[in-house]
Image (cartoon, rainbow, N blue to C red):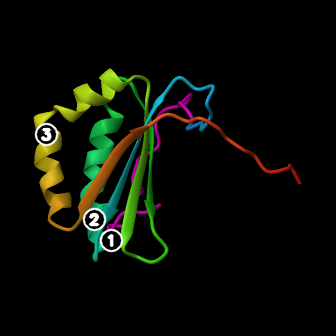
Amino acid sequence: MRGAAGGPIVRAMESPRPEATISPDQSVMTFINVWTTERPDELVAALEPIVELMARQPGFVSASVHVGLEGDRVAVYAQWRRREDWQAAGRLAELHALLQKAYAVGTEAPAVYRVTRTVLGAAR
């Protein structure tokens, strides 16, 4: 995924790096934030520094930014080692300042989840 300036949303981390795994066997907390917007490119650009800030916080595992095919939604899927790590990151003053730019172009609907089941397709 590329940001508005053409750069990656999250820069590559040094190897070895954690991988996003969606499985009920993983002991991670999942945060999914679905944004509604009429300007998805601007919203993705506003989310880029937020995702990068979160990536530097203790307990952060991964984040993926998705743009809806209809062009009116942007979803952020993030994994954290513990809910407490996510909550601590959410109290950062820098985060709240960055969120103002995202709020200017979109409306969020955040929620916290746990994976209960994963179904994989047959290998081909």
Tell me how far mark 1 sits from mark 2, CA to CA.
Answer: 5 Å
Magenta span has 57? no
The x and y percentages for residue 87 are 26, 28
Q: Which mark is residue 43?
A: 2
Q: Which residues are magenta?
A: 1-19
Secondary element at tag 3:
helix
Cβ atoms at labels 1 and 2 below 8 Å apart: yes
The x and y percentages for residue 108 are 27, 57
**Residue, x 59% and y 38% (percent of image)?**
22
Image height of 48 relative to 119, above or below:
below
Q: Which residue is mark 3?
A: 94
Q: Is residue 70 left or right of residue 118?
A: left
Secondary element at tag 1:
helix
Tell me how far mark 3 sits from mark 2, CA to CA.
Answer: 18 Å
Dot placed on the residue nearer the N-terminal end, 3 or 2:
2
Q: Which mark is residue 41?
A: 1
- Tell me, yes or no, if residue 7 can be seen here: no
Type of amino acid under label 3: Glu
Q: Which mark is residue 65?
A: none
- Tell me, yes or no, if residue 50 can be seen here: yes
The residue carrying pointer 2 sits among few (fewer than 14), some (14 to 19) or many (20 or more) residues within 10 Å by Cα, namely: many
Type of amino acid under label 2: Leu
**Residue, x 26% and y 49% (percent of image)?**
49
